Amino acid sequence: MPAPNKLAEPLRIAVVADISAAAREIARALRQPGHIVHGALLDRPTACVRTQSTPPQAVLLRAGPRSTERALEYASATAGDAAPLVLLTPIGSPGSAELARRAGALVHLVEPTSTQALLAALHVAIARAGELRHLRAELVRAQEAGHSRLVVERAKAILMRRFSLTEEAAHRRLQTESRSRNRTLTETSWHVIRADASLAPGEAGYL
């Protein structure tokens, strides 16, 4: 594997391989341009992935046809880790594409390959992982916003029913109460909903 020029921003990479010689060769090739690499065998991967003081930015997993099950066990055990997975398999390995899918690899490479290709795959995996984290955060925010809207709408309906208010008046009342108690609109709405659940049908004890 020819080494590219040194980079200004070294990557932190964990190399997990099924064969010690492969782990050493890959680690040596990635270290030459200045990247920070920790290597381990597939049956003892935690030594390089979970005990580092600084977590890796990506994990390069090399798995041959005889280590498919161990590779899947490793991928399952580290599924909650933040580091994205790049899978490297020997050419002609049966079921390698399915292994990549089941292992959750963001990039799949086939040996023989170059150091430049490995680094390109690692950069792509890191970028994709960042995009996925952003999308998940956006989804959570959207779900929370949708849930908050439902809570506010339910609280307004309660006020409209209990106090014979219009929707606009009920909304203003929630806003006024939120400001006076230094609460968010959603928090005030939850108080209205809980109070309504504890009151008898004819009572109007909140707001």
Image: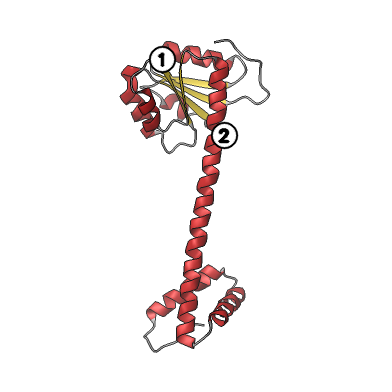
Task: Quarter of the image for the N terminus: give it.
Answer: top right
- 47 or 189, which lies in front? 189
Q: Which amino acid does label 1 sit on?
A: Ile
**Mark 2: few/some/many CA within 10 Å (<14, 14-19, 20+):** some
Give 177 or 155, whichever is nearer the viewer.
Answer: 155
What residue is disc 2 on?
Answer: 127
Residue named by callout 1: 91
Residue in the foreground of this view, choosing between 5 and 35? 5
Which of 176 and 114 lies nearest the eye of the viewer? 114
Is residue 23 shown left or right of residue 36?
left
For the image, the number of numbered tags is 2
Q: Which residue is drawn at 44% across and 75% down?
A: 193
Q: Could one spot residue 54 in this view of the protein?
A: no
Task: Tell me the distance, in whole angstroms, between the alpha carbons under discs 2 and 1.
Answer: 26 Å
* Left or right of 150, for residue 18: left
The quadrant in which residue 29 appears is top right
Q: Give the residue at x 60% y 14%.
A: 32
Label 2: element kind: helix
